[in-house]
Image (cartoon, rainbow, N blue to C red):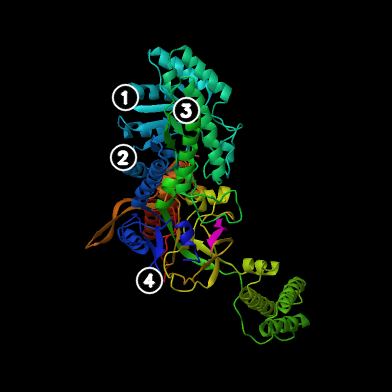
Amino acid sequence: HDLYALDVWGDGFFSINEQGHVCVKPIEGQDITIDVNDVVAEALDSGSSLPLIIRFQDIISSRVRRLNRKFRDAITEAGYEGQYRSIFPIKVNQLQEVVVEVMETGREYDIGIECGSKAELMAALPLIGADTLLLCNGVKDHVMLTMMLNAQQLGQQVIPIIEKYSEFEQLMILAGQRDAAARLGVRVKLNTRGAGRWYESGGARSKFGLTVPELLRLVKTLEKAGQAGSLELLHFHLGSQISDIQVLRSAVKEITQIYADLVLRGVNVRFLDVGGGLGVNYGGDYDNPDSSINYGLREYANVVVYAVQEICEERGVPVPTLLSESGRALTAHHSMLVIPVLGVHRPDSPPMNDETPPDSPTLISRIETAYQEACATEVTGILLECYHDAREIREEADQLMRLGYLTLDQLAHTDSLYWSICREVLRKLSDAQLTPPPTEQLELEEQLTDLYLCDFSVFHSIIDHWAIQQVFPVMPLHRLNEKPERRAQVVDLTCDSDGKIDQYVCGHANTSWLPLHKHNHGEAYHLGIFLVGAYQEILGDAHNLLGRVDEVHVYAREDESGNFWIEETLKGLSVKEMLSQVQYFPNDLDRRMTELVRKQINAGVIKAAEGSRILNNYTRRLEESTYCTTEVVR
Ligand code: PLP
């Protein structure tokens, strides 16, 4: 557990069983524990292939309940005379099954939806009934504003949140044309700046929101039109993954003062919306206080409830209904990516145990001596000296080889001894547990890290790792009662040196390598990348034309047939579908391929039967996944 820090990022959902397998306990308060490896086996049996997204739908429900309960507890404890409703921002994961799961569990808590674009609005409108709150942030043109007014006319609780003054002017014109007052909210640019990676989403220079003078102008315009009651909601958003709870407290206080001022002048704002930003602990970012979070759900809820209540009491105004647009916190945990290891590249050469090659120059006996000394000593200073010597001798050997003074045998002997020294020195330095470790140790760790080639694309499945160095938990899904002997870095299928995972959560620290088990070519060794349910899937791109992966949606269910149920299987993108997105169409490709094969048959290069086999193979593969197969030819 400690090695991969499950207790830090697992949020109580993940554990390791006696067989050394990763398990999931998706429903809070129920003891159903699902072995992830069983899910993988069943998915593969029923035709899915790796890489595979597994969605534990019950985890979504557990997170929705947990967030809402924490707010209810805070409200009860504080004696807050209002309510809390969470609003799900669908940008975090628009997949219908995810949104529906959130909405179904959220029904008992009056959960709402937030959308930020035309397509998101059009997806959300038919999903909500008459009572569900639908908030619309982001840039809104007259087409979107009209759709929202139509929804209001239908009796739906749709509230556009004004981000720019011109949006308000457009809304007033459109509402005026129908002789109706529009319901609306306003995003306010607070002086409090966010804390964390997305801090620029808040503060005076943020992209969205009205300044206080603009808000006042809007209020006066509404008052003049006799529509002060239209302004129902005040909102701010500090950016995702708020790292410091004090910053949230300060922003809540700032907006509550504005709320109180408006209420006192007769504008009865009903909702106070504290935006997104509720952080998720990915178990990483130990070295970067900007991206770790210093609070949990309970503290978040308490800060919002108590800060609003305190100011409302001081100012003598009724408390508003509290809203938060927490997205990451509801969806990050539910989904994981299973990736198979395809092969391992070891940078070092194995020991050769050969005799010294004949006529060797003195550098060979020098490196042999360095090796014997490294084996014989435990003293740090001598170990470092052996490594320094080995490094220098290897450089000399390179030069001699270029000048033609070293045979291939002699070079191989030197190289093999160099790596033996490196392994010996690193093993002993690691055992000595020096703090801080000498730079040579770090250098050796990097040199002696294996590259584990895995079947996935960083750019498609965990783009935030590449884009903003977000750390995602990675660990083997099995063999966890065996000691992982290898130092590994996970690399992906793309032809891009950035296509790798170079930050891990390991033993409550962040490391550039992960301990993994020895992988035997052709044997199944599966790794899990966890907490990928927020933002990753929709932001992911198609680098090297690696597309959407297969996925299964799993529910916990205990009966005689087992303890889970794959409710739905979705196929990833086929090669054919992926190619069509960049204007290569299967019919045309088939036609060109047929012509090419026919030409070679006619020219006598291949026999007709061979031509058919090659052509069939090409056509069949167009239907398959864009990823590799894990099968090896024996
Ligand atoms: N609300 C708004 C306006 C946003 O821009 C975002 C995303 O940054 C969210 C809510 C969701 O934030 P989070 O996923 O951090 O809860």
Mark 3 lies on residue? 316
Mark 1 lies on residue? 155
User: Is residue 397 something that shows in the picture?
Assistant: yes
Return the disc, 4 or 1, that comes first in the chain's sequence: 4
Give me the residue at 44% from left, 18% from top: 228
User: How would you rate the neighbour count of disc 2 (Cα within 10 Å): few for under 14, some for 14-19, many for 20 or more?
Assistant: few
Main structural element of the magenta stretch: helix, strand or loop?
strand
Tag 1: amino acid:
Gly
Return the disc, 3 or 4, that comes first in the chain's sequence: 4
Mark 2 lies on residue? 107
Question: Which x, y percent locates residue 559?
Answer: 23, 60
User: How would you rate the neighbour count of disc 1 (Cα within 10 Å): few for under 14, some for 14-19, many for 20 or more?
Assistant: few
Mark 3 to mark 2: distance in Å? 32 Å
Q: For residue 304, which numbered disc appears in the image?
A: none
Q: For residue 18, which numbered disc appears in the image?
A: 4
Return the disc, 2 or 4, that comes first in the chain's sequence: 4
Q: Is residue 504 magenta?
A: yes
Q: Is residue 130 magenta?
A: no
Mark 3 to mark 1: distance in Å? 33 Å
In the image, which residues are magenta?
A: 500-506
